[in-house]
Image (cartoon, rainbow, N blue to C red):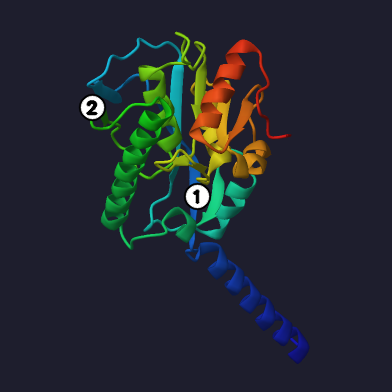
Amino acid sequence: MSSRARALAVCSALVLALLVTAAFAPLPYSIAYPGMTANVLGDDKGKPVITITGAATRKTSGQLRMTSIVATGPDASVHLPDMIKGWFRTDEAVMPREAVYPVGNNTEEIAEHNAQQMRESQNSATSAALGAVGKSAKDIKVKLSLADVGGPSAGLMFALGIVDKLNGDGAGKDLTGGRTIAGTGTITAGGTVGAVGGVPLKTQAAHRDGASVFLVPRKECTDAQAELPKGMRLIPVTTLDGAVQALKALQTGGKVPSCGR
């Protein structure tokens, strides 16, 4: 074998070794999937998701479903083949690990952080909803119970559920109009709706569980449209009041916001 051939063989072996190493080396990414959804107007594990005391509540129809994603854990090893597969599938998403787990270095720390965010989200949702219907937290107590879910992204749907149980559309009808409506979005005590991430996967989870309408933070319209399931209608929102008005318009045939305008 000539010296040139030997050099080429060595180089080829080194390139192959690097490729093999790259293929099987763990990378700082997580793979996310459509997660569970839950009807905030219904029960979860035998308990009402929303319990209100101190005020009369309405019997509701239809569903308001919060949505979620699930992802490989912070300690899971994600390799190049996993990422390539995720890039080509519509029901998976490759996300930087720090975007999925921005706080905490282990499962326990992350779970506690997510639980704290959920508690804060529930408090904000309660304040926003009571403010929207002109009720005082001094007179009305709201308990929100949803197991195995963390983070702040259910805030909008919690708030809508409280509004529906207390006031409906304000004219004796349900906010849902009997539909299965899903959505996502953080919420402040003042009723401002914020972005959450993972929206394309959440629309798929919503479609899987029977929703035909999806409430999305307006800033995430483009993301939501990327892998939108056939037949799913997007309604962008920026505030709780805007979401309520949009659902009323959906029932009456009025002008409903869309991601195109």
What label does residue 21 carry, if any? Answer: none
What label does residue 31 carry, if any? Answer: 1
Q: Position of residue 230 (x, y in %)?
A: 66, 25
Q: Position of residue 69 (x, y in %)?
A: 46, 40
Quadrant that contains the N terminus: bottom right
> As rendered, which of 224 and 27 lies closer to the eye?
224
Give the quadrant of residue 8.
bottom right
Q: Indicate whether 94 appears above or below 156.
A: below
* Residue matched to label 2: 139
Q: Residue at x 49, y 39 (%)?
A: 185
Q: Earlier in the sequence, mark 2 or mark 1?
A: 1
Q: Is residue 154 among what the camera can see? A: no
Amino acid type at circle 1 is Ile
> As rendered, which of 40 and 34 lies closer to the eye?
40
Q: Residue at x 48, y 56 (%)?
A: 99
Q: Indicate whether 162 appears above or below 168.
A: below
